[in-house]
Amino acid sequence: MSVYACSDIHGNLAIAQQVVRKAIEGNTIYFLGDACDRGNHGWQIIKLFLETDNIIYLCGNHEDMLMRAMRPYFRGDDMYRYTHAFEVWSWNGSAMTEFGITSDNIERASVYFSHLHTLPLTANYTNSKGNKIYMCHSGWEYFLRDDYHDLKYNEKIIWDRSHYFEPHWLGYNNEYMIHGHTPIPYLIEDAIEDWPEDKDWDTGALHYCGGHKIDIDMLTIESHKACLIDLDTFEEIILEGEE
């Protein structure tokens, strides 16, 4: 059986079902956050991933926004939409996820909502070649330093993009960081100076910073693709599925 990472499928149920099938087959899947929002089936996917053995689900910034925005709702506050947290979530494509939550039985939904609060921010895996693979949503590698090893929450782990411009890898030669958060074409535009204009970006993961950082966010909401990367071989499976 294999160990994979995947990220940022944003409500695409067809791709989520393929991820679940891989897990049911006995493979381990690290999902690096952002199952919800923008697409139509975010809440359904959150529940599906939380229910599936072999999926190790990390928190993304969209899960974090959901928890902040919907906390008053689960406390019985009918005015939950009139908060800054809800406004921020709305700006980020929350409509169908919110609809899924409020259409659900509130007692059942509250169980899943509570489980979201237990999602880890980071994970690591030592592969068959002895390489250490670190994973988090944003790719913020500063938590590799000793003073961050006991970190329980830092929003940079799910939000930061400034590290893209760091020219030097902070880890050792046998260490790698896999992340999502920023779609590959946006990262290329903002931080990859020598990307050929005629080269396609949607063929798989983006390896940068001397190959030590790997972005697997394939802008699923537009490309209808997601990258499943094998953590032992770095080989990739491209999942495809229309909403």
Image (tube, helix red, strand yellow):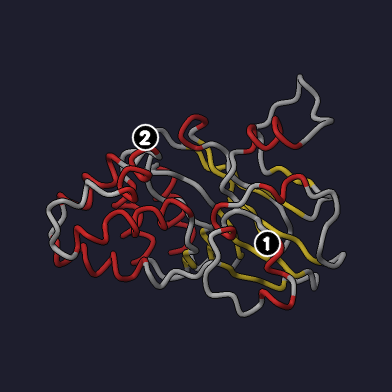
Q: Residue at x 33, y 70 (%)?
A: 115
Q: Position of residue 132 (x, y in %)?
A: 75, 70
Q: Which mark is residue 129?
A: none
On screen, residue 242 above or below 13: above
For label 1, the crowd category at 10 Å Cα-Cα, with few meaning under 14, some 14 to 19 and many 20 or more, is many
For label 2, the crowd category at 10 Å Cα-Cα, with few meaning under 14, some 14 to 19 and many 20 or more, is some
Quarter of the image with the C terminus is: top left
Q: Residue at x 34, y 51 (%)?
A: 85
Q: Which residue carries the number 1 mark?
A: 231
- Left or right of residue 150, residue 212 in this image: right
- Circle 2: residue type: Glu
Q: CA distance from mark 1 to mark 2?
A: 27 Å
- Left or right of residue 149, residue 48 in this image: left
Quarter holding residue 99: top left
Q: Residue at x 55, y 65 (%)?
A: 154
Q: Nearer the viewer, residue 234 or 31?
A: 31
Q: Is residue 13 visible?
A: no
Q: Position of residue 180 (x, y in %)?
A: 59, 49
Q: Earlier in the sequence, mark 1 or mark 2?
A: 1
Circle 2: element type: loop
Q: Residue at x 72, y 46 (%)?
A: 164
Q: Which residue carries the number 2 mark?
A: 243
Circle 1: element type: loop
On screen, residue 154 above or below 12: below
On screen, residue 233 above or below 220: below
Q: Is residue 194 visible?
A: yes
